[in-house]
Image (spheres, helix red, strand yellow):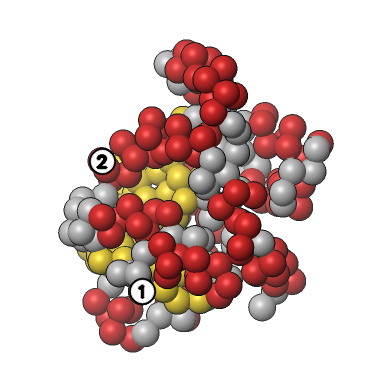
Amino acid sequence: MTTIKAHVQDYFDSNAEIYDVKHGVTLPGQSYNFTRYYEPFLTEAIRPHTTVLELGCGTGLYSRWLADRGCTVVGMDISAQILNQARRRCPEGTFIAGDCEDPAAHLPEPLIDQRFDVILGVNTFCYYPNKPAALANYKQLLRPGGRLVLIEVNGRCPFWRMMTWIDKNEIRAWFGEFRKLNRMTFRAMLDQAGLKTRKITHFAFVPNGVSRETVSLLRPIDVILNRLPLLRSLAMRVAVVAENI
C-alpha cells in the first residue's frame, strides 16, 4: 500500500467512531444538502432495484438509502473499522474492506463476473492519487449501459482553500488532490476511460458540518447562487453521471 493510501486508512480507522459528527454526516448541513441536492440527483441517476457497488461507503449513509430503494448494495471502504458502522446502519448490504481505486482486487469472483448496474462514489474519488486508472478499473466492473455516479469535491470552489487555512479535518493534506476535480477535468478523464458523460452539474454552498441556525442563515444565499450558472460553477460539489458504452 502506498504511503498516501496508508495515511487515508489510518485517518479513517482512527476516526471511525466519531466520523459521522466530525465530517457532518449526521449534522444539519448534511441533512439540508441531502434533501435539496444529493437525493434528487441520486434519484434521477440510480434506478430502484439495481445492483450497486458503493465505493468509499464510509459509515453506510448512502448504502442505507440505496437499500431502502430496493437496491442490492455492495459497499467498499479502505477502512475496516469504519465498515463496522456501515454494517450496523445497513445490515442488508455486503461490505468489503479494500482499495477503492482498484475494487476488483478485493471483490469475490462472482461479483466481478456479474458486474454492476451502478458504481457510486460520494466524496471519495477526490482522494485517489491515480484517478484515470481508477476510472479504467470501474469501466471493467460496469455492465454495458451501466452508470458511474459521483458526487465529489469541486476543485474550483474557494471554500476548500479557506478550509486549508484553518486546517479543518484532513483538508490541508488533500487539497492538492481536491483541486484537480472540476467540470473540464472530469469530462476529459471520463472520455479517456471510454465512459460517456451524461451529466455534470454543480451544487451546494452550505457546508455539511454546520448547525441548524447556520443553515437557516445560508439557505437564501445558497438558493440564489445555485440559480446563477457562472457562480454555481464555484459550488462545493461537482456531480457526474457517466455511462459505460
Farthest residue toward the left? Answer: 49
**Quarter of the figure that contains the C terminus:** bottom left
Q: Is residue 165 left or right of residue 10?
A: right
**Residue 21 percent across, percent down from the top left:** 60, 49
**Mark 2 residue type:** Glu
Judged from the image, the secondary structure of the residue bearing numbered disc 2 is helix
Mark 1 or mark 2, earlier in chain? 2
Query: Which residue carries the number 1 mark?
Result: 94
Label 2 CA crowd tier, 10 Å (few <14, some 14–19, many 20+):
few
Judged from the image, the secondary structure of the residue bearing numbered disc 1 is strand
Q: Nearer the viewer, residue 144 or 30?
A: 30
**Quarter of the figure that contains the N terminus:** bottom right
Q: Are marks 1 and 2 in contact (CB under 8 Å)?
A: no
Q: Which mark is residue 25?
A: none
**Residue 144 percent across, percent down from the top left:** 23, 63
Residue 231 to residue 175: above or below: above
Query: Which residue carries the number 2 mark?
Result: 44
**Residue 142 percent across, percent down from the top left:** 30, 65
Q: Residue at x 32, y 44 (%)?
A: 42
Farthest residue toward the bottom? Answer: 109
Q: Nearer the viewer, residue 221 or 237?
A: 221
Q: Residue at x 45, y 45 (%)?
A: 151
Res 84 visible: yes
| Quadrant in which residue 214 is drawn | top right
**Residue 213 percent across, percent down from the top left:** 57, 23
